[in-house]
Image: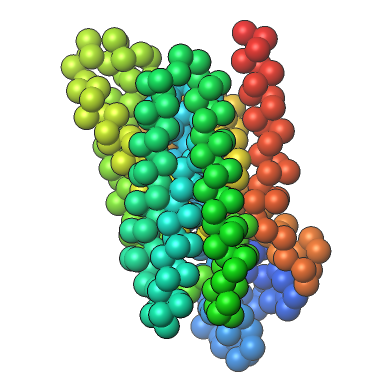
Amino acid sequence: MAYGILLLLLGGLLLANICMGSVTIPLEGIFRFIKGEALSQVEANILFQIRLPRALSAAILGGALGLSGYLLQTFFHNPIAGPFVLGISSGAKLTVALVMVFLLGQAVKVSSAALILSAFFGAFLSMGFVLLMAKAVDKMSMLIVSGVMIGYICSAITDFVVTFADDADIVNLHNWSKGSFSGMSWENVSVMAVVVFVSTVCVLFLAKPIGAFGLGEGYARAMGVDVGRLKVALVLLSSILAACITAFAGPVSFVGIAVPHLVKQLFGTTKPLIMIPATFLGGSVFCLFCDLLARTIFAPTELSISTVTAVFGAPVVIIVLLRKKER
């Protein structure tokens, strides 16, 4: 039932994102195209060059973001851990911005693979710093504060680099640095789809050990789980997913924190075999909905995706904190 709700929302929002915009493409036109009738040249260009790649990117990257947040919450046993809050997205943003500024300044085209690799390097460095802080501090609240400080430092350096960039292409980094699904190409979609699919399959294979780890390290060891290897896998997979999102869309806030909790409430379970695909679907639905609002609510002006996700995601985090305090 719950999966059906998410799939219906996913399908409906995909259609809405394709049809709605400054130029409306009628739903009947989409159905006629599916039956074999041709669209007008303008509609075809808008559909296949702009809206469909963007909608698919929002669905893929939104799912990856939700899943990355779920892995980090499992790893740290903290309900408000996420790639944005822990500074992992900001670290990835910094290295991507530096690579793009350098390569574009040399008139070199930046490939999708280069973006992901540079983002992974930044995400992994930030994650390493967070892990060092986790050993140095006793309270998880201090770890979150450390992550937020990492995020501020990386964001400040990124903004400095983007502000003083001269080239017109580099100046466009400003929109990316605030978070946006605009400007996606089919090459971007194909690369992110492969990376996210492989990572998600790997996470699914770890569902059983993740379930044991969620009940405590002692219990996981008693069940025969190699906790050390599992932790390494969780760090690598969450970093890869966070890096993929940041490389293409920039930092997107609160999705990684809010979606796992919303999905948990919807399904009424914490079983990883259910939570992993459900969190992915939930992240896709959340980002498609927020991107639709970002494009249309003040059209033709477009909001950054993080602005909209913060409006809907931040209250979820506040509710989680209040519930935790009550317990």
Residue 225: horizontal and vertical position, in percent?
A: 21, 21
The mark tally for this picture is 0
**Quadrant location of the N terminus in the rendered image:** top right
Residue 282 in the figure: left or right of residue 70? right
- In the foreground, 182 or 45: 182
- Which residue is located at x 37 percent, y 14 percent? 215
Q: Residue at 36% of width from left, 48% of height from top? A: 240
Residue at left 42%, top 32%?
Answer: 130
Residue 151 in sight in this render: yes
Q: Quadrant of the C terminus?
A: top right
Residue 204 visible, this orientation: no
Q: Which of 150 and 314 is in front in this view?
A: 150
> From what the image shows, is residue 242 above or below residue 235?
below
The chosen color scheme is rainbow
Quadrant in the picture for residue 223: top left
**Where's residue 13, x and y in %?**
63, 57
Query: x and y percent of residue 98 in the render?
Result: 45, 62
Residue extending furthest toward the bottom: 41
In the image, residue 275 sits, relative to residue 6, either above or below, namely above
Residue 114, image quadrant: bottom left
Residue 184 horizontal side relative to residue 273, left or right: right
Q: x, y percentage for residue 310?
A: 68, 44
As drawn, the residue found furthest toward the right would be: 298
